[in-house]
Image (spheres, rainbow, N blue to C red):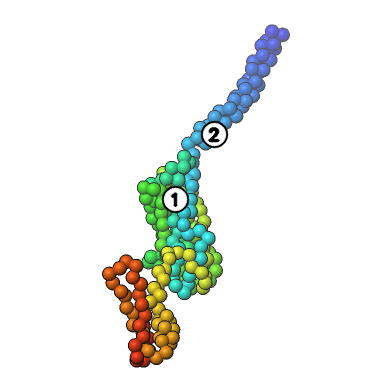
């Protein structure tokens, strides 16, 4: 009986150790699976705001600065063909994209760039344009701040009117002529020739 009891205790000891050994190996397997899963997660995209950030849009002129963004990958290379979604606020300061929509979807060019022209509304104040870019399972987000104002405008330069086309200039010249007709003559034949003013009798002439 003593020999049988020893063997029985030995078998029971092996069975008790087996679950503990298996449970000790499980965390190692789980950690390996997690590491492999982490390596397959796509990296995020970067969205750079090239134009339209922190600008003033003029309500009286109806002029807005279109946002322009560039999408880049983790290696800082432009991403061509990425889907870019621009979203304007539904209410308050902002505007609308073509078709009276507050959302515009487009794709990046070969330089990784995308733009979203829009019409501003008549509501004063600051607003944000939400931008989302996606490509091959990767995603990036950005926010562009603009302000609708009745004052300053930042955008393409508006050409100034030449001085000789301004009505006020000719009114002043006509008044200084003292009732005479102001005639503009240019002497030809010399590169150094300068225009001369000749007064002849008559009433004042006002240019338009």
Q: Residue at x 38, y 76 (%)?
A: 164
Q: Which mark is residue 34?
A: 2
Check the picture and name the quadrant holding the N terminus. Answer: top right
Kindly indicate the quadrant of the structure image that contains residue 25. Answer: top right
View extreme (left): residue: 189
Q: Residue at x 50, y 35 (%)?
A: 39
Q: Position of residue 160 (x, y in %)?
A: 41, 71
Front residue of this view, candidates 39 and 62: 62
Q: Is residue 121 above or below residue 184?
A: above
View extreme (right): residue: 2
Q: Residue at x 41, y 54 (%)?
A: 114
Callout 1: SS: strand
Q: Position of residue 87 (x, y in %)?
A: 46, 60
Instruction: Please tell me whether mark 1 or mark 2 is closer to you in this view.
Output: 1
Q: Residue at x 32, y 78 (%)?
A: 185
Q: Which residue is mark 1?
A: 70
Q: Can residue 196 be seen in this snapshot?
A: yes
């Amino acid at each position: 009986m003593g020999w049988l009891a020893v063997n029985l205790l030995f078998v029971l000891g092996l069975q008790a150790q087996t679950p503990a050994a298996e449970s000790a190996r499980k965390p190692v397997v789980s950690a390996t699976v997690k590491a492999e899963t982490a390596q397959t997660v796509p990296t995020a995209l970067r969205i750079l705001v090239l134009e339209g950030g922190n600008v003033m849009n003029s309500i009286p002129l109806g002029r807005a600065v279109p946002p322009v963004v560039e999408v880049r990958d983790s290696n800082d290379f432009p991403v061509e063909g990425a889907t870019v979604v621009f979203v304007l606020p539904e209410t308050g300061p902002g505007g609308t994209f073509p078709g009276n929509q507050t959302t515009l979807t487009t794709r990046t060019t070969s330089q990784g760039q995308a733009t979203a022209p829009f019409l501003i509304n008549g509501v004063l104040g600051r607003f944000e344009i939400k931008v989302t870019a996606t490509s091959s399972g990767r995603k990036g987000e950005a926010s562009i701040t603009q302000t609708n104002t009745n004052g300053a405008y930042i955008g393409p330069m508006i050409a100034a009117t030449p001085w000789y086309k301004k009505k006020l200039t000719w009114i002043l010249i006509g008044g200084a002529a003292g009732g005479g007709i102001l005639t503009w003559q240019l002497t030809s034949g010399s590169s150094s020739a300068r225009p001369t003013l000749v007064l002849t009798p008559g009433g004042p002439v006002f240019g338009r």
